[in-house]
Image (tube, coloured by chain):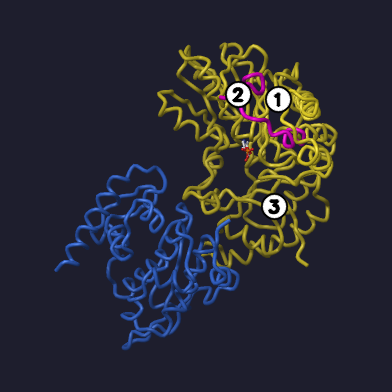
Amino acid sequence: MKPLIYADNNATTRVAPEVVHEMLPFCTEQYGNPSSMYAFAQAPAKAMDTARERVAALVGAERPDEIIFTSCGTESDNAAVFGTLAALPDKKHVVLSSVEHPAVYNLAETLQHRGCRTTMLRVDSQGIVDLDQLANSIWDDTALVSVMWANNETGVVSPVKEIAAICRAKGVAFHTDAVQAVGKLPVNVREAGAQLLSLSGHKIHAPKGVGALYIKRGTRFRPFFVGGHQEHGRRAGTENVPGIVALGKACELAAAYLQDEVTRVRALRDRLEREILARVPDSFLNGGGADRTPNTTSISFEYIEGEAILLYMSDAGICASSGSACTSGSLEPSHVLRAMGVPIELAHSAVRFSLSRYNTDADVDYIIDKLPPIIARLREMSPFAPK
Amino acid sequence: MWDYTDKVMEYFRNPKNLGDVDNPDAVGEVGSMACGDVMRLTLKVEKGTDRILDARFKTFGCASAIASASILTELIKGKTLDEAAQVSNDDIARALGGLPSAKMHCSVMGHDALMAAIANYRHAPQPDSEEEGGKIVCRCFAVTDKHIERVVRENNLATIEDVTNFTKAGGACGSCHTQIQDIIDRVRRELAAEKKT
Ligand SMILES: Cc1ncc(COP(=O)(O)O)c(C=O)c1O
């Protein structure tokens, strides 16, 4: 049988068995609505409290009620930006970075439609935002700065403390999309100095469709979802109790596995990357000069196109993703790699491998064995590859 | 994940006629690396009869670009250049059991490579090129008005989205959308008029 080597953990992760175990009763026996008055609804309400404490603990929040639960990372990002703007009606400007995930990046257009100006911070060749440009881009009417903690395509980690210090000095709120940082790096909102932080369950071995937003106490915020009084009136809608319980457990596990992530997973990633670069000529690491999450590597294979690589890898049982246009569903390759100044043809040929606690040495052996002939085969088809 | 037909995957996994013809009589190369796909078609053509004795391809691009180029070589081998010129992008797509709509440009590209090779053989200017009087409409993907016109006409396209799916034009910055709409409107008026007469 063909093996399954899952190396696309920045896209989504396998739900941890411990998480499934803990969430299941809230689908079967404990299905009450946590807002209800009867005793039957107490267990779900209590379980949500525990989950909130666990999320708060993982990100270093001062109090659990600084965490609101959402439906996903995208909602957390949208709520952070629009919720801040709605609370500050005089402010008409938002600063973003040019390497944000679409959940933030694509807000720029919507913001402009709503009469808001946006500044897109440039990044250097390693994907790090220009801090001078940031300092010069904050005006009296700037509502928010949003810069991601870790990049989903390259793993590049932003200098969040420096960014927060600049925002603090200028008196503007700082939101960070930490969807790819949580569970992979120590994340502490108080040390970092962020007022808002997004995270998502399915990137840390909880199911899809649950996320959280940290809102530091005292931060100006109006609800993005309006309706009932759930989440202290900050996010309406009956709570996804099983998902929230799962997210809480996943956060507890993430803390327990962090050491594994920064040592064993990092060693796996380093070996994978080193061997691919050594075995495949004309392959280039993207963002390799920066501090990166321990699980991610982005490598461009000159002369060939990413989708073709992914499909040949899929035939070999390997799951990864690409920065190419064909896989993005658009006609243009990754805006992240382009913002870093990666030449367009190398952006089309980028492949991202992202590992997790479930990957093994055998997985890395398999990939480094199967990949070089795949690249060689596709280069035979390319009009550009040297003979 | 694209919904590729088994045929596309078959020609992607085991492409036929891969490579370059030695000392080709005709070469057609279209696309650019920056745009994400390039096709090179090389032909061996029999003098006198203009019959295609051999056709080979090389492609930088995705699965459907590779499959389109490969099946094109099969469709045209043994045909005369005049017969081959009758092979449309739709013939390529149909031979593959269909392509996802957003990938139709791969079949168009196969057709373009063929037309480019024939023009090259006949020492004619490259079809739809600026040299042939075309004007660039989409700067992002370097697509001319002539090209859009021809593809709209041949495939009876009705919307900007169709044009983007078939030619990539308008698929990036979007600043040429009004021009594309004008071309669609004009060609459709012409087609309607031709039908009446
Ligand atoms: C950096 C980043 N932000 C936001 C998201 C969106 O999260 P979700 O899929 O939970 O909406 C993702 C996931 O793709 C991500 O990688």
Please give the residue where the numbered disc 3 appears in the rendered image.
A277
Residue at image coords 39%, 59%: B166
Q: Are marks 1 and 3 on the same chain?
A: yes
Q: What chain is colored blue? A: B
Q: Residues within 10 Å of mark 3 (few under 14, many from 20)?
A: some
The reply to whether callout 1 and callout 2 are in contact (CB within 8 Å) is yes
Residue type pointed to by label 1: Ser
Whether residue A157 can be seen here: no
What percent of the width, then of the height, locates residue B6? 57, 70
Closer to the camera, A97 or A179? A179
Q: Residue at x 67, y 52 (%)?
A: A320
Residue A312 lies, in percent from the top left, at 64, 63
* Amino acid type for the residue under numbered disc 3: Leu
- Residue A35's label in the rendered image is 1
| Residue A369 appears left or right of A88 | right
Report the side of A297 relative to A262 (left or right): left
What residue is disc 2 on?
Answer: A228
Between B30 and A335, the one nearer to me in the picture: A335
Residue A245 part of the magenta segment: yes
Where does the magenta region start and end?
A: A227-247
What crowding class fits label 2: few (fewer than 14 Cα within 10 Å), some (14-19), or many (20 or more)? few
Asked if residue A197 is among those painted magenta in the image, a careful observer would answer no
From this viewpoint, which residue is outermost toward the bottom?
Answer: B48
The residue sitting at 46% across, 50% down in the picture is A331
Amino acid found under the numbered disc labelled 2: Gly
Q: Which chain is yellow?
A: A
In which quadrant of the rendered view does residue B126 lie?
bottom left
